[in-house]
């Protein structure tokens, strides 16, 4: 039953429509295309290509876009540079006017895949001779896979690490070696030692675990996870409960979550008065891009990076990021595939690194690395451009962020990923504010996520 | 509430004819209006553009969405599968629906009286202004013109529990301000405070109503020795009660559909930074549609909210008949 026909029936007999059973074959609908023996993606591309969500706002993005465009003769590229908006995409999909290529958060890929709104890209990789688990970090391929097929081409992998303020640590007599996340009880004690307050409000945060945003990462540290291999939510695992209990202890040792959060919200994170310049934090959890921000104030900060380790003491690398995907209704999927493969190739990333170095040298700044999502490109860039900066502390920070990439960990992939993330964030918040116990909070979150899962699974 | 007799006499009744709204009604029947076909046709022609737009963009959309609420719509294949009342059953089984409705009601109960009270205070101040009245009207209306995103960004700073200006101001009086954006008990009041920023719309309407109150009534009241408060309570409020009634209805409907402020304050990063206290029905509906892509369920939620708003509005109208004073005699 087409939407147009339904509109007339609905106007005339809504109730009858609600009771009628009509499961006949759809007429004029957009049937899923079956992939036959031939590869649906061609390397001989031409025509118009519309992208959406990719914004080449800096030299890294622009150089990659330029490289991809130069490789694709005969393809004219039009870019919608606004962020991916699911509401806009739903309207585009309903009208059959989707772009050819989307850039979106990796957490959204499985949701769209489960709704059959984007197409598998295994044959896209194959057409260009790319082995996805070699060219990209395997954990990132896992992040964009659904039911055994790959639906995205990932980019960027800026893993988290602990970024310590050496001045505050030295003042409290704490060494970076004390920041061992494989011993979480000691972290709480260290946080309490580093924490300071004035007038009943925090003046120095001892240990900021970036909660609730990085909760899933802390679940991994404790051996837990937000979903299983199939994407089914597993929020109420005992390991997750232990992790959340630890998070609550960590916050309570530092004046409570509410005060810590309010203090963090008031920080000038990107400016000259940032929390590392003003010594408002001792240790924070940051992705690799943040040292690049602090590099502008290299003479005013004193840093040391420490890997985040799991329970076995192994450093782990976990991060969100984006990926390219091709809508089912894309008019030029071959060109979309070609563009995305080229824009995330080692050559494109090297062009981006060249452009970044040019900017860094022109502005006399530090090059803090470029974490591309491709181990091949990362190594090439590191070999060519990561050299001593003259600032030993920043050299140590850069080296640490590169070192953790040797053990990438997947965030997981689920058709109800966004709902799970929402429920997880809610659970962490209500547990940290004391509204519910960690166990109850995660149990409620699991129930909510399972309801969404059951909707998808039926 | 009826106006107290202040010795002025009943409102004058016009002679009959076209101004028949002042004609005494016959017992048990509404007075008949003479029907002028030409005038009626002209009226309909004037409102025709609106009618067309209403039909195209509202009636058809509402009918379609009602039908959609009984289906499972597959966006990728454009196939609609009727599922009967399954979506409505899911709403009944989902505890978050009750949570979000509860949050929405509490917000409406807090927001509507506060916003109207503040709007009325501002309107009274503006009415009393002589010099610079135009300037003050502009200044009071300016906040309404601020984009919602900018307002939310500012309020994130103002409502900060440690360093925000609101708690700093409370601190001047020795009051320890709460953690507005984190403490579940204060999440909804924080959104109400942000909503007060946009009361200028109601203020303008109330100002017009205040300016329509006949001056001679106040003069007569003063002559009779009525105090300012007595004049306000027994003259002003009854005579602007139809406008207040209208604003109560409109603001209640708007409050029950709250989305912008809650989304911008707590869901801006794609994740909630507050507990379930910040989950409003409009936000949950949005998540059902554009996170889960479950349009049938989202349509069912929309219609549930519609029915609830309809019921509340019906109750308000029933109460309004008893409490609102209409000039020109009884309404019935």
Image (cartoon, rainbow, N blue to C red):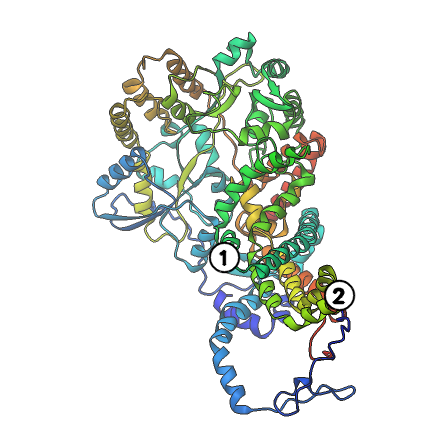
Q: Is residue A91 left or right of residue A257?
A: left
Depth order, front residue of A350/B78: A350
Name the residue that disc number 1 marks: B132
Q: Give the residue displayed 76% in from the left and 89% down from the top.
A: B26
Q: Give the residue displayed 75% in from the left and 87% down from the top.
A: B29
Circle 1: element type: loop
- Give percent across and percent down for residue A455: 61, 48
Task: Give the numbered dot on residue B225.
Answer: 2
Q: Distance between the residues labelled 2 and 1?
A: 30 Å
The extreme top residue here reads A173
Residue A368, compared with residue A156, is above or below; it is: above
Q: In this view, does B145 lie to the left or right of B239?
A: left
Residue B13, compared with residue A169, is above or below; it is: below
Q: Which circle, 2 or 1, is nearer the viewer? A: 2
Q: What chain does mark 1 sit on?
A: B
Q: What chain does mark 2 sit on?
A: B
Q: In this view, does B67 lie to the left or right of A326?
A: right
């Amino acid at each position: 039953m087409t939407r147009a026909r339904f509109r007339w029936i609905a106007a005339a007999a809504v109730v009858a429509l609600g009771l009628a059973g009509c499961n006949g074959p759809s007429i004029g609908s957009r049937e899923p295309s079956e992939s036959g023996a031939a590869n649906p993606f061609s390397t001989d591309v031409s025509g118009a290509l519309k992208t959406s969500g990719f914004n080449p706002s800096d030299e890294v993005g622009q150089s990659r876009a330029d490289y991809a465009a130069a490789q694709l003769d005969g393809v004219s590229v039009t870019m919608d540079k606004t962020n991916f908006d699911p509401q806009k995409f739903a309207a585009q999909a309903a009208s059959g006017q989707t772009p050819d290529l989307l850039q979106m958060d990796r957490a959204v890929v499985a949701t769209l895949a489960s709704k059959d709104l984007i197409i598998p890209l295994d044959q896209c990789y194959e057409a260009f001779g790319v082995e996805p688990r070699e060219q990209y970090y395997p954990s990132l391929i896992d992040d964009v896979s659904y039911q055994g097929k790959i639906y995205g081409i990932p980019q960027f992998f800026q893993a988290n690490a602990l970024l310590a303020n050496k001045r505050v640590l030295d003042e409290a007599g704490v060494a970076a070696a004390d920041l061992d996340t494989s011993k979480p009880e000691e972290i709480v004690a260290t946080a309490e030692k580093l924490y300071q307050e004035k007038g009943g409000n925090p003046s120095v945060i001892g240990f900021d675990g970036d909660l609730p945003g990085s909760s899933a990462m802390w679940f991994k540290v404790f051996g837990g996870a937000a979903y299983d291999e199939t994407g089914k939510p597993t929020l109420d695992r005992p390991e997750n409960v232990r992790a959340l209990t630890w998070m609550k202890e960590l916050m309570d040792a530092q004046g409570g979550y509410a005060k810590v959060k309010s203090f963090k919200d008031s920080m000038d994170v990107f400016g000259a008065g940032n929390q590392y310049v003003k010594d408002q934090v001792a240790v924070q959890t940051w992705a690799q891009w943040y040292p690049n921000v602090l590099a502008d104030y290299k003479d005013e900060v004193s840093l040391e990076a420490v890997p985040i380790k799991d329970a076995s003491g192994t450093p782990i690398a976990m991060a969100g990021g984006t990926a390219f995907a091709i809508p089912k209704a894309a008019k030029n999927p071959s060109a979309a595939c070609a563009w995305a493969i080229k824009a995330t190739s080692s050559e494109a990333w090297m062009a981006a690194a060249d452009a970044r170095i040019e900017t860094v040298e022109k502005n006399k700044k530090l090059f803090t690395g470029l974490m591309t999502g491709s181990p091949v490109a990362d190594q090439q860039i590191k070999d060519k451009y990561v050299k001593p900066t003259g600032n030993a502390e920043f050299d140590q920070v850069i080296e640490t962020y590169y070192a953790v990439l040797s053990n990438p960990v997947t965030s997981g992939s689920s058709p109800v990923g966004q709902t799970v993330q929402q429920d997880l964030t809610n659970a962490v918040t209500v547990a940290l504010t004391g509204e519910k116990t960690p166990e109850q909070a995660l149990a409620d979150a699991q129930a909510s996520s399972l309801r969404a899962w059951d909707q998808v699974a039926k | 509430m009826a106006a107290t007799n202040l010795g002025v006499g009943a409102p004058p009744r016009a002679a009959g004819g076209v101004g028949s709204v002042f004609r005494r009604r016959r017992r048990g029947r509404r007075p008949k209006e003479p029907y002028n076909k030409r005038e009626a046709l002209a009226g309909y022609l004037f409102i025709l553009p609106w009618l067309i737009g209403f039909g195209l963009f509202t009636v058809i959309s509402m009918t379609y969405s009602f039908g959609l609420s009984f289906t499972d719509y597959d966006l990728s294949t454009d196939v609609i599968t009727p599922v009967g009342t399954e979506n409505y059953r899911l709403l009944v089984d989902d505890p978050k629906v009750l949570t979000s409705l509860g949050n929405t009601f509490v917000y409406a109960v807090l927001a509507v009286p506060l916003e109207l009270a503040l709007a009325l205070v501002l309107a009274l101040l503006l009415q009393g202004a002589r010099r610079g009245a135009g300037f003050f009207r502009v200044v009071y209306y300016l906040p309404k013109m601020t984009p919602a995103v900018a307002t939310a960004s500012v309020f994130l700073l103002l409502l900060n529990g440690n360093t925000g200006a609101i708690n700093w101001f409370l601190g001047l009086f020795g009051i320890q301000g709460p953690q507005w954006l984190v403490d579940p008990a204060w999440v909804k009041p924080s959104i109400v405070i942000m909503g007060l920023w946009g009361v200028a719309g109601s203020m303008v309407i109330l100002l017009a109503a205040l300016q329509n109150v006949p001056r001679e009534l106040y003069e007569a009241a003063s002559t009779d020795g009525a105090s300012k408060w007595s004049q306000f309570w027994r003259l002003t409020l009854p005579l602007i009660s139809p406008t207040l009634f209208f604003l109560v209805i409109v603001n209640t409907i708007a409050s029950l559909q709250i989305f912008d402020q809650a989304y911008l304050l707590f869901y801006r990063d794609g994740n909630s930074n507050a507990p379930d206290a910040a989950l409003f029905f409009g936000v949950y509906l949005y998540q059902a549609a554009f996170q889960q892509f479950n349009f049938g369920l989202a349509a069912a939620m929309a219609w549930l909210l519609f029915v609830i708003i309809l019921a509340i509005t019906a109750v308000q109208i029933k109460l309004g008949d008893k409490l609102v004073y209409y000039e020109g005699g009884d309404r019935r």
